[in-house]
Amino acid sequence: MIVIKTAREIDCMRQAGRVVAEVLEVLRENIVPGVTTLELDRLAERECAKRKARPAFKGYGGFPFTICASPNEKVVHGFPDSDPLREGDILSVDFGVVVDGYFGDAAITVPVGKIDGVRQRLIDVASRALHCGIERAVPGGRLSDVSHAVQAYVEAQGFSIVREFVGHGIGRQLHESPQLPNFGPPGQGPRLKAGMTLAIEPMINAGGPAVTILEDGWTAVTVDGLPSAHFEHTVAITERGVEILTQV
Ligand code: MG
């Protein structure tokens, strides 16, 4: 069942979303050659504490960290570690919080120093793909219009869509109904209406779409070892259209 949120609930989610956006901006400024993802994880935790927000991922299904840190060929759910990031890497950071019982969830992919042209284009296409999806999250449309818009844009750019992980409803739970794939034909699934809140999150690979999970049971990596990018926003569908909750 898709939970429709009241205006008051969306206001709570706006506050959670603002914290997510602010902390991701702090992280972005600190993603430089030499920093470790474990340092970024601790930084995220301190930034949450400052804002009296609880990290949403730590302990979720046993996930042991505050951020998911997925460099290069890692797609999602990477564990922060003590390896310094190197010039030319890209890093996907997925991060969520709970404020007053409501969740916000977002992801960014950030260049580490100067990166090559393919990685830059991958980041640009993944970011634009997210916005192609968001534009279709409007009252009266169908859920798979969002999926299709993401897929059509990404494949036209020559990159591939990860199938195994999907976006989701969000609210009092981190993951609510419906599931939101980043591929598929348009015009299917539930009709979109005001009060729905969704986490839209395309994961885009430079090479083939296939992914596999490492021995830690969490980290998804591309099978061909080529880089992957991930962007996510939590959005609310309103009478007037769509509002992005996880941006400052
Ligand atoms: Mg998510």
Image: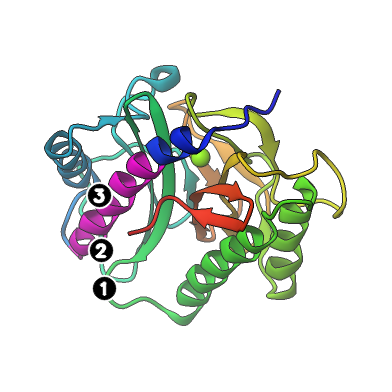
Residue that appears at 20% across and 50% down: 36
**Residue 165 as seen in the image, left or right of residue 92:** right
For label 1, the crowd category at 10 Å Cα-Cα, with few meaning under 14, some 14 to 19 and many 20 or more, is some
Find disc 2 in the rendering and name its residue.
86
234 vs 73, nearest the viewer: 234
Q: Tell me, for residue 23, which label it has, or none.
A: 3
| Span highlighted in magenta in the image | 14-33
Mark 2 or mark 1: which comes first in sequence? Answer: 2
Amino acid type at circle 2 is Arg
Mark 2 or mark 3: which comes first in sequence? Answer: 3
Find disc 1 in the rendering and name its residue.
113
Residue 10, position in %: x, y? 47, 39
Query: Looking at the image, do the residues carrying marks 2 and 1 touch, with CB atoms under 8 Å apart?
Result: yes
Q: CA distance from mark 2 to mark 3?
A: 22 Å
Residue that appears at 48% across and 43% down: 76
**Residue 10 as seen in the image, left or right of residue 179:** left
For label 2, the crowd category at 10 Å Cα-Cα, with few meaning under 14, some 14 to 19 and many 20 or more, is some
Q: Is residue 68 visible?
A: no
Whether residue 17 appears in magenta in the rendering, the answer is yes
Mark 3 or 1, which is nearer the eye? 3
Q: CA distance from mark 2 to mark 1?
A: 8 Å
